[in-house]
Amino acid sequence: MKFFYVLYQYLIAWPLLALLTMFTAIFTVCTVHWRNAEFVHRVQQFWSRSFFWLMFLPVSVDGTEHIRPGQSYVFVSNHQSMFDVWLVYGWLPVIFKWLMKAELRKVPFVGTGCKAAGHIFVERRNAKAAMESLKEVEKQLTGGVCTVIFPEGTRSLNGELGRFKRGAFQIAIDLGLPVIPLSLSGCFDVMPKGALAVRRHSVHMHIGEPIDLKQYSDPNDAIEAVRSAVAAGIRK
């Protein structure tokens, strides 16, 4: 059965997803002037959800009641797999901008589509360029537009939660925005870093309660509080 599932992925699912990716990128470029419109976001959500539908992966989400319509947030998530991106993009019920590594700009269609959608590429090896990227994303966080950041910086090699970098929190501090922790579970089991095929496993996204960083005098305490909240929501 496992053999046929892998065969299905390479012969049917991945080719279909490649076509959907091309279509979504072209659609996003064509609608660049409406990049924050709900209908554009719905198409992008459909693309993301297709990765789970075509791979027959069950998805569950809780905590959406913690999101107040019209409020901008900084969402901070753990990062286990490529499927984290599609899980968040597909089921987080807000319009948001990714803060993403600059290497993704070179991926065919994906880089062009992300740029048209207003996502921000970060040059992680250039501190000055990274700061400019943070300023760019800050300009977009108004009227309920949010940002989602993986503060670990890269996918986990073992599924465990890594150390959080400060960038995401600097945005929240600069703009006085609340941080909402996202806890993703199961994506590591679906496709860990380096894997060549998807494994069937349920995935879950827990949306935590907003955290006001102004209650912490020490930024390190704020980072640790958010990290603890993310860790607490991950299903074992």
Image (cartoon, grey):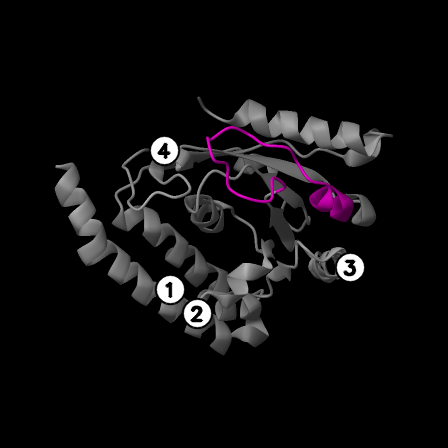
Contact, mark 2 vs mark 1 (Cβ under 8 Å): yes
Q: Are marks 3 and 4 in contact (CB under 8 Å)?
A: no
Q: Which residue is depicted at the point 42% across and 42% down?
A: 193
Distance (Cα) linking label 2 and label 1 = 7 Å
Q: Mark 3 points at which residue?
A: 128
Does the stretch in magenta take in 47?
no
In x, y percent, where is residue 102? Answer: 59, 60
Which residue is denoted by mark 4 in the rendering?
189
Question: Where is mark 1, residue-wise?
Answer: 21
Which segment did they paint magenta? 151-172
- Cα separation between marks 4 and 2: 27 Å
Percent position (x, y) of residue 140? Answer: 70, 61
| Residue 135 % position (x, y) | 76, 59
Indicate the secondary structure of the residue bearing disc 4: helix
The front one of 141 and 64 is: 141
Amino acid at dot 1: Thr
